[in-house]
Image (spheres, rainbow, N blue to C red):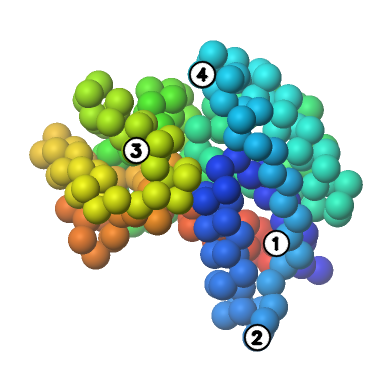
Amino acid sequence: MTQHIGIVAGSAEGAALCYRTICLEAPALMGEHNHPEITMNSLPMAEHMPHIRANDWESVGKLMAASAQKVARAGADFAICPDNTYHQAFKYLIPQSPIPWLHIAGAVAEEARRRGFARLGILGTKYLMEGPVYPEALERFGIEREIPGEEERGRINEIIFKELVNGVFREDSRLYLNEVSDRLGARGCDAVVLGCTEIPLLVRPDDAPLPTLDSTRLLARAALKRALGQ
């Protein structure tokens, strides 16, 4: 039987893109108008952000676990979180979660290995770029990574929190992310991770200087395969 997917949301834009991807891509596998059952719990980002700013990932994990309890009570068999940054709380979350989880960086790492990439540039919030989420996931596959410089990380973080999570998509911001990707390519990266779940709404793969790994859609596809027992 098809499994029930639980989505534990952070930002509205990222969660919506993940949900929409599952629903749009499922009919090719399941038939017209069909997709797995999905339950989403969406706490306001305002409840998460004070803990994230304080590097208090244990408290973030408790909030995510509370959301997991809610989707589990609704019947979800497993959960996903479309926010890369929140995965820093996984070591606190998993022991108290009533259901298993898929890991967004794990889905990206598997796709990077499949496509033969050796060194990835990581784009995302400053917490993600400077944190352990992608280093830990990529190390298991022997894939190296680079992050933008300090000033670039600050500008990208501002684009995410001042623009993207609020549904603002500016052309100058898109071009800036392309410039950062180009510089990562000059440092030896052969692909770039769109590691903030809203960045795929701004960056265009056909216009990007490097191949892109869309973390949001890769997580959605991994959830769809899991739900179908593939």
Say whether disc 1 or disc 2 marks the residue closer to the N-terminus.
2
Q: Residues within 10 Å of mark 2 (few under 14, many from 20)?
A: few
Q: Are marks 1 and 2 in contact (CB under 8 Å)?
A: no
C-alpha separation, residue under disc 1 versus residue under disc 2: 17 Å
C-alpha gap between disc 4 and disc 2: 44 Å
The secondary structure type at the circle numbered 3 is helix
Residue at the image position 60 percent from the left and 19 percent from the top: 51
Q: Which residue is mark 4?
A: 53
Q: Amino acid at mark 4?
A: Arg
For mark 4, give the secondary structure. helix
Q: Are marks 4 and 1 in contact (CB under 8 Å)?
A: no
Query: Which residue matches tag 1?
Result: 227
Q: Which mark is residue 159?
A: 3
Residue 169 x %, y %: 35, 52
- Crowd band around label 1 with a 10 angstrom C-alpha radius: few (<14), some (14–19), many (20+): some
Amino acid type shown at disc 3: Ile
